[in-house]
Image (tube, coloured by chain):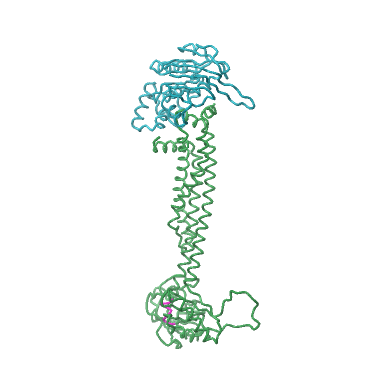
Amino acid sequence: MRPADALAFAATALRGTPLRTALMLLAMAIGVAAIILLTALGEGARRYVVGQFSRLGSHLIIVLPGRNETQGGPPPLLAETPRDLTLDDALALARLPAVQRAAPVSLGSAPVAHGGRVREVTVIGSTPAIFPVRHLKLARGRPLPTIPPDREAPMAVLGGHLAHELFGPRSALGEWVRIGDRRFRVIGVLTDQGEALGLDLGDMALIPVASAQALFDTRSLFRILIQARSRSAIPAAEAAIRATLRTRHEGEDDVTIVTQDALLGTFDRILRALTYGVAGIGAVSLAVAGILVMNIMLVSVSRRIAEIGLLKALGATRRQVLVLFLLEAALLATGGGIAGLVLARLGLWVLQRLLPAFPLAAPPWAAPAALAMALGAGLLFGLLPARRAADLDPVQALEGAH
Amino acid sequence: MIRLQGIERDFQVGRERVRALHDLDLEIPDGDYLAVMGPSGSGKSTLLNLLGLLDRPDRGRYLLDDIDTGALSEEARARLRRERIGFVFQSFHLIPRLTAAGNVELPLILAGMAPVRRRQRVAETLASLGLADRAGHRPDQLSGGQRQRVAIARAVIMRPRLLLADEPTGNLDRHAGHEVIRLLEDLNRGGITLILVTHDPELGARAGRRIQLLDGALAAPG
């Protein structure tokens, strides 16, 4: 028998029972679409988190006041209040050889007003170093002035969204805004970089760190952002930072140091595993589809006993009958798989509309893997009905029709 | 040339062993027109299934054109069936989703013949059986007589030497039945060996030779 003829025969057999065929195609399509959609969600989550972390900056080390104890044990008898991080700490860290830059961050919330408009936003006090450390980009104007960090200056850089809210289409450069009870001149506007780890960079104002400390009436820093000289310098920088701060804090190890790479690597691994996990869940739905195909094909074989008997009387070998029925299963799997790809594309489009900020994308291996799994499931679950058909005794099969 | 020697065939029915064929010897020369007669349960169909290589005897030898069929593999038996034997059934056994041409083409497809040659052969065969204008019809669009003629076309399209017909007129009215029998007899005159299983004495009387089966044995050799 020629392959094309075998394929055509299997196809007419499937067309002969359109409802059954449609049902099996649908089951296969749902299975394939489930795999692709679930992996797309998993991969989207991974990309989202990785994107969030890389947006923070490169070779980034974050120093937070206070120590996160991960060991158990009784609480200390004397309540320890962690020592604050200070501007001098930041300046000391900036001088370390493994450190490229250090940007102190003082953070608070304050109303920013211009004319009649007021917006309550996050106000960040820092030095010009925060621009390269945090990958901040200016749309217009210039960054914070390079002045001694302990000097105040009435200058502010606004987030893009905030500038638009206060000034509309007009340029904000050179205008005065009121932040809290102080006046600042707008010297720059950031491009809209969206959100990063919950902080909306469009909706904030950036002022010199000394001005922020005066505004919020505090000497302590929210955190210190540090850029290491290179990726390989990160561990050395981390050790040096810890040592320096311990010396400066009278031997107390009272800061938490988080490196971006460690966080990134951990999340990347976790979310990759998650993607494989959800792909596995999708595969279960394909297995269910395969069992449905097996069921319906068994019915089909019992309905076509006379036909199988006839094929054998006409000289079809056991192998030929087996191939014909396996081809039916393969056609169903392939057709269902292709329908599933279309369905997945449609589903992705709808999901993307619902979650525009989520970087939804199936990993490149998802579609071929799903198709291969569909074909595998089809052949595996088609084998039993096909063998049942091939093993039918022709005499009994022909009599079965009477 | 068909030679059956000492054929035995038993079936297990419940606890009992039923003897379907018992010590059967039979020779059928090429081009013969043989009617196999007998009451139902006498072993007619079993004999036909053995001759058609759909079934194997428990004991005895079946030589088809000097080939000892007992020694053949299942694949080889399927090949012999395809190339040398045509079947005509009482209930036609046409595949309902295929057209008349599609049904007739089936043996050629199983034999792996090229599509161009296939179409030509199908058209010739249908035309010779007066079915040229029915090629595109599905079985449910055909009369009983036409269906059996399509089935005969399918049985002879591989140009077999042996044609096995099991009550070919059983589901047809008198007129259509006569037409089918005349068609089979025409084919026999063309050289094909025709073995006709029937319980109708009138049909049996037309055959060149008759055998009567009773309880699995020859009762009245013709």
| Chain B: drawing colour | cyan
Quadrant of the rendering where the N terminus of chain A is positioned: top left
Q: Nearer the viewer, residue A48 or A393?
A: A393
Quadrant of the rendering where the C terminus of chain A is positioned: top right
Could you tell me how many numbered marks the image carries? 0
Q: Say which residue appears at 43% left-offset and 29% top-offset.
A: B79
Compared with A317, A267 (above or below) is below
Q: Nearer the viewer, residue A332 or A384?
A: A384
Q: Nearer the viewer, residue A248 or B58?
A: B58
Compared with A359, A256 (above or below) is below
A236 inside magenta stretch:
no
Compared with A146, A56 (above or below) is above
Q: Quadrant of residue B38?
A: top right
Compared with B24, A161 (above or below) is below
Q: Say which residue appears at 40% left-offset and 38% top-offset.
A: A3
Residue B87 percent across, percent down from the top left: 46, 24
Residue A114 percent across, percent down from the top left: 45, 79
Q: Say which residue appears at 54% left-offset and 38% top-offset.
A: A298
Residue B58 percent across, percent down from the top left: 54, 25
Residue B186 percent across, percent down from the top left: 40, 16
Q: Nearer the viewer, residue B154 or B140?
A: B154
A130 inside magenta stretch:
yes
Position of A143 compared to B12: left or right?
Answer: left
Q: Quadrant of residue B102?
A: top left
Q: Bounds of the magenta span?
A: A127-133
**Chain in green colour:** A
Q: Say which residue appears at 45% left-offset and 79% top-offset.
A: A206
